[in-house]
Image (cartoon, rainbow, N blue to C red):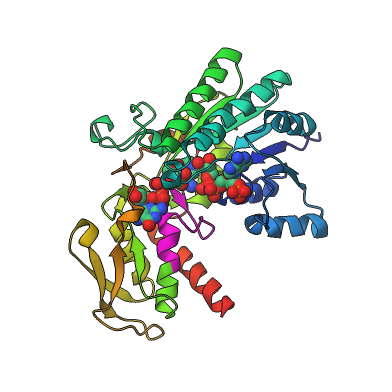
């Protein structure tokens, strides 16, 4: 008996998660369609290798120009593709930047989700198409009193978003749930905690740190300027997390899931772990905007740097008007998906630093 090839549509395909998800779905035999925005220069670096394969090995991969702010375009693409599964990953995803363009973020991250759901309804695809919505731990806002008795955020914890991004995503969360309940669409929210990788955008804190680690070790940068070192994040690997997204759409009943590691780490400690990868031991001193980190020891023969040199400083321009101080997720329900992450934080940091060293060495 032959099974029909499944068709997936991925918004945000050029992003970190979109690129890993495309690889995973292709491995699973899907025909993958992606929505990419037109840009004045190439913005497909993360998926160029797949696009190349499409020509050489007949991989089932197709890109469409589109934008989540354009309903007609979304409807047309969905009509053409007739997807079995839609993964709505497209978003203006930077929390700090959302304070600068709050209306745009509401339009893309909030109403953009509605546009996908409505398109499915307008086209009469409610029974055929399953929808994954990229929801986020930013919905919780890090309020200590909203954690569960065990000290984690779970599927029942109250939301209190602390940025225009979080507020836009909360609309995306509820409209997804509402369309599930009102129209019986298989539509789910994955409430994903932070996940990183060598493909992470360069202005998110982890990648900024691992890139600076490589550049400082190789003598190409003097100092790393960061914002709040006192917040804590539950960091996983994007490759693991896209697997969870896929599993969320393969269940008998549509539900929302927290995807997290259950371990939280200070930004300062991520900096420590990252520099330790190049043999640099750091000493932090001072408080808040006066905090600095100097080189305490340098134990790697390839990277000889001056002991006592200041290599991390705080720059308040990276502070947010309202901060999410602490995130830690309860992954208990995700076990129902049969999902187990393959990476821990140490493995993630190792891979990111090694990749950034490699990129810099190649550019030399
Ligand atoms: P990225 O910022 O790496 O990717 C975002 C993607 O969205 C890019 O492909 C971008 O295109 C696209 N995009 C931006 N604006 C629009 C628009 N107007 N119309 C269509 N597409 C658009 O994010 P991640 O891959 O890290 O995250 C994927 C999703 O998951 C996002 O929705 C994010 O908010 C959410 N999320 C991420 C978490 C994380 O830790 N990574 C945690 C929880 C949720 P372009 O390349 O042209 O900019
Ligand atoms: P976040 O990720 O806001 O959690 O959103 P980000 O890496 O931007 O910030 C994490 C924490 O680090 C602090 N920080 C800095 N952040 C940045 N970007 N740059 C700095 O220089 C810096 N210094 C300190 C921040 O204040 C914050 O506390 C990410 C995004 O992927 C969202 O799309 C996603 O929804 C959430 O994760 C879960």
Numbered label tally: 0
Q: Nearer the viewer, residue 156 or 311?
A: 311
Q: Quadrant of ligand 1?
A: top right
Question: Can you say whether 25 is above or below 40 in the image?
Answer: above
Q: Residue at 34%, 76% (x, y): give it.
A: 279
Q: Residue at x 22, y 56 (%)?
A: 288
In this rendered view, identify the residue nearer to me: 108 or 175: 108
Q: Position of residue 92 (x, y in %)?
A: 53, 42
User: Would you say residue 29 sits in the magenta stretch?
Assistant: no
- Looking at the rendering, the stretch of residues picked out in magenta corresponds to 194-211
Q: Quadrant of the C terminus?
A: bottom right
Image location (x, y in percent) of residue 38: 69, 48
Direction top: furthest residue = 182
Q: Position of residue 206 (x, y in %)?
A: 41, 58
Against 114, is 316 above or below? below
**Quarter of the figure with residue 50:** bottom right
Residue 324 in the image: state x and y as whole percent. 32, 42
Regarding residue 126, the answer to whether it shows in the image is: no
- Residue 205 is inside the magenta segment: yes
- Can residue 168 be seen in this snapshot? yes
Residue 306 occupies quadrant: bottom left
Q: Is residue 148 above or below residue 177?
A: below
- The residue shown at (23%, 31%) is 145
Q: Quadrant of the N terminus?
A: top right
From the viewer's perspective, tell me whether residue 283 is left or right of residue 119.
left
The residue sitting at the left extreme is 286
Query: Is residue 249 left or right of 147 when viewed as pictured?
Result: right
């Amino acid at each position: 008996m032959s099974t029909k090839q499944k068709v997936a549509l991925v918004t945000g395909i050029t992003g970190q998660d979109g690129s890993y998800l495309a690889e995973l779905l292709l491995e699973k035999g899907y025909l993958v369609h992606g929505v990419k925005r037109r840009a004045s220069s190439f913005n497909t670096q993360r998926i160029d290798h797949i696009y190349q394969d499409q020509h050489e090995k007949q991989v089932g991969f197709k890109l469409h120009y589109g934008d989540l702010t354009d309903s007609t375009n979304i409807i047309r693409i969905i009509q053409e593709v007739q997807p079995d599964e839609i993964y709505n990953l497209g978003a203006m995803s930077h929390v700090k930047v959302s304070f600068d363009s709050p209306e745009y973020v509401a339009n893309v991250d909030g109403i953009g989700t509605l546009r996908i759901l409505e398109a499915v309804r307008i086209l009469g695809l409610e029974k055929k198409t399953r929808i994954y919505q990229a929801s986020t731990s930013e919905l919780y806002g890090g309020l200590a009193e909203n954690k569960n008795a065990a000290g984690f955020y779970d599927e029942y914890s109250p939301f209190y978003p602390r940025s225009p991004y979080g507020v836009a995503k909360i609309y995306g969360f509820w409209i997804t749930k509402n369309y599930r309940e009102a129209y019986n669409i298989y539509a789910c929210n994955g409430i994903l905690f932070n996940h990183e990788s060598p493909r992470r955008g360069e202005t998110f804190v982890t990648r900024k740190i691992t890139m600076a680690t490589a550049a400082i070790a190789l003598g190409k940068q003097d100092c790393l300027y960061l914002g709040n070192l006192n917040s804590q994040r539950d960091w996983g690997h994007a490759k693991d997390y896209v697997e969870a997204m896929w599993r969320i759409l393969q269940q008998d009943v549509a539900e929302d899931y927290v995807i997290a590691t259950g371990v939280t780490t200070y930004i300062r400690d991520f900096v420590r772990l990252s520099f330790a990868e190049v043999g640099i031991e750091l000493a932090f001193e001072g408080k808040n905007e006066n905090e600095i980190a100097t080189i305490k020891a340098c134990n790697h023969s390839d990277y000889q740097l001056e002991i006592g040199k200041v290599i991390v400083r705080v720059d308040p321009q990276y502070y947010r008007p309202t901060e999410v101080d602490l995130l830690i997720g309860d992954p208990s329900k995700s076990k129902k998906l049969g999902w187990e992450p393959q990476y821990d934080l140490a493995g993630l940091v190792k891979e990111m630093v090694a990749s950034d060293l490699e990129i810099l060495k190649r550019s030399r």
